[in-house]
Image: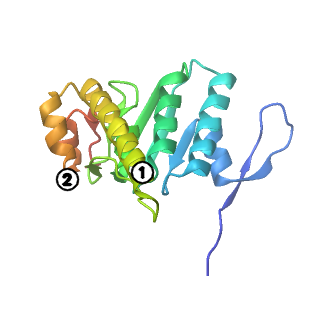
Amino acid sequence: MPIGVPKIGFRIPGDEDASWVDLYNRLYRERLIFLGKEIDSEVANQVNSLMVFLSMEDYTKDQYVFINSPGGWVTPGLAIYDTIQFVPADVQTISMGLSASVASFILAGGTPTKRMAFPHARVMIHQPASSFREVYAVEVIMEAEEVTKIRENITKIFTKRTNLPLSTVIVEMERDSFLSAEEAQAHQIVDLVTSEKE
């Protein structure tokens, strides 16, 4: 039986009494954002609006985006990446579990020196794909051209964010490339792998 989202006591600044809020709202107050599902427009809008709100509240404090996502739609993922670049606060990206496809792109988009992975995290990079539907040939060609443009753009950004040669990024993106946390650090997708407690 599902338990739903737990409620916890929290005193909102300015209020005298604590009130019960769901766990995620409490975490948001600490500037902790969780990206834990497939990325679509709704998820991107929630994450983006939260990052903008937190920046309006205090643009000097870091935001933390914890990622455990199989990826999802490219355009909403690019919107999250762009918002990370837009907000004045530093955005620390943390891979926990899996950061695949466009989620790995978001991971790499965090503030340089503040991108990290948990020790057992996996990162998967690959080229963007299309969801070719049953459409006319002209539409398929137009969609293929758009996918090519997006792929070139993502490849250039990955090259810039990781300081890897363009040829290396192209080869790695040709197939599903699964990387351990250490390999993601070697590829400069993350800057740090957290250590396990002794």
Say what amino acid the circle numbered 1 marks.
Val
Q: Position of residue 177 (x, y in %)?
A: 20, 51
Instruction: Tell me the quarter of the picture where residue 133 sits.
Output: bottom left
Q: Is residue 181 above or below residue 59?
A: below
Residue 184 disc label: none
Q: Secondary structure at mark 1?
A: helix
Instruction: Tell me the quarter of the picture where residue 160 sits.
Output: top left
Q: Which residue is mark 1?
A: 138
Image quarter (top left, top right, bottom left or bottom right) of the N terminus: bottom right
Q: Position of residue 167 (x, y in %)?
A: 13, 33
Mark 1, other Cα within 10 Å: few <14 / some 14–19 / many ≥20: few
Q: Position of residue 179 (x, y in %)?
A: 20, 50
Mark 2, other Cα within 10 Å: few <14 / some 14–19 / many ≥20: few
In this picture, residue 109 sits left or right of residue 84: left
Give 135 or 112, whichever is nearer the viewer. 135
Say what amino acid the circle numbered 2 marks.
Arg
Q: Which residue is mark 2?
A: 175
Which residue lies at the image location 18% right of the left edge and 38% below the top edge? 170
In this picture, residue 31 sits left or right of residue 192: right
